[in-house]
Amino acid sequence: MLKTIDRHITLVDFQSFLFPRCNCLWIQDDINCLIDNSPDQADLAHLRQQRIDLIINSHGHIDHYLYNQQFPRSKIMMHPEDAAIAQSKEKYLEAFGMTTLNQDSRLQELYLKEVQYQTTRIDQYINANQVINLGTTYFEVLHLPGHSPGHCGFIFPEQGFIFSADIEFSNFGPWYANLDSSIPQFLQSIDRLADLKPDYFISGHGAALVTENITKRLKAYRDIIFARQRRIVDLLYRGYHSLAELARHYPVYQRAPQPAAVFYIYEQVMILVHLRYLKEQGYLIQDNEGYYLKPGLSPAKLSI
């Protein structure tokens, strides 16, 4: 669904959470630009009839660049830290834990098929603080890592909004099921968005326009990370020390979503990201495949 933001900017609103789709921005100016490129079929058909000079992908997950190959004349840009996963199925599988935590080649191939993985051409990199000038409209690149190393948002100063991509205000909370995802970076990215105090956000998934209770919603979104961390620490304290033991309790998802084989890997990856964060904080000792709270520590004593 197309929704007018201003004379030059149109929101390509997917309106729900359904992989591999996302909300996109279409900017018609001296240079016509599409930010992210995984709309529904009707909007895709419309966009293919337009002159799209530039496509900027917020990051290297397929649900944000699904249709790049259908725009062969467009210049494509992405942050360099996400280029590898967007240009190699092996790197994509590795990032999502599909090779490290799974040796079933049939599941790997099925995963690539189901997510509709394909590579994308990248003609030029975007970088932090870069200003993209399209004529009348301009915006600035915000490097917001954590979800992925190269994840970016975009601030539109004159219009007063930020396109926040996969910092998406969902009830599920932050998603960091890549082995190179980072909780400290994700927290810093959320805090940075809060400090910028835009008039509103446009999210990459779900209800696109976030206009009310922004500070409260960002804090609630951020706090989900700490709720997960507390559940993991509680499991460690109760004697569950291996990744498999922890994952069977689903401290992140809190249930076993379908397809179970895939979401079990996602659960393990996000637990690993938490365990790495706990080690960085000095709370955790790793002994081979076992993870242990440092002696004398209990959930009540940890600042999480």
Image (cartoon, rainbow, N blue to C red):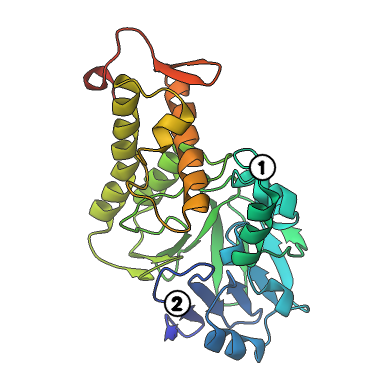
Q: How packed is label 1: few (under 14 Cα within 10 Å), some, or many (20 or more)?
A: few
Q: Residue at x 45, y 45 (%)?
A: 189
Q: Residue at x 47, y 85 (%)?
A: 7
Q: Residue at x 57, y 39 (%)?
A: 179
Q: Residue at x 43, y 85 (%)?
A: 4
**Label 2: which residue?**
14
Q: Is residue 79 visible?
A: no
- Residue 239: percent from the left, percent from the top? 34, 20
Per the image, label 2 sits on a secondary structure element best described as loop
Q: Which mark is residue 103?
A: 1
Estimate the spatial distance between the alpha carbons at disc 1 and disc 2, rounded to whole Å: 35 Å
In the displayed structure, 172 sits above or below 36; it is: above
In the picture, the quarter occupied by the N terminus is bottom left
Front of the two marks 1 and 2: 1
Front position in the image: 57 or 251: 251
Horizontal side of residue 279 vs 151, given as left or right: left
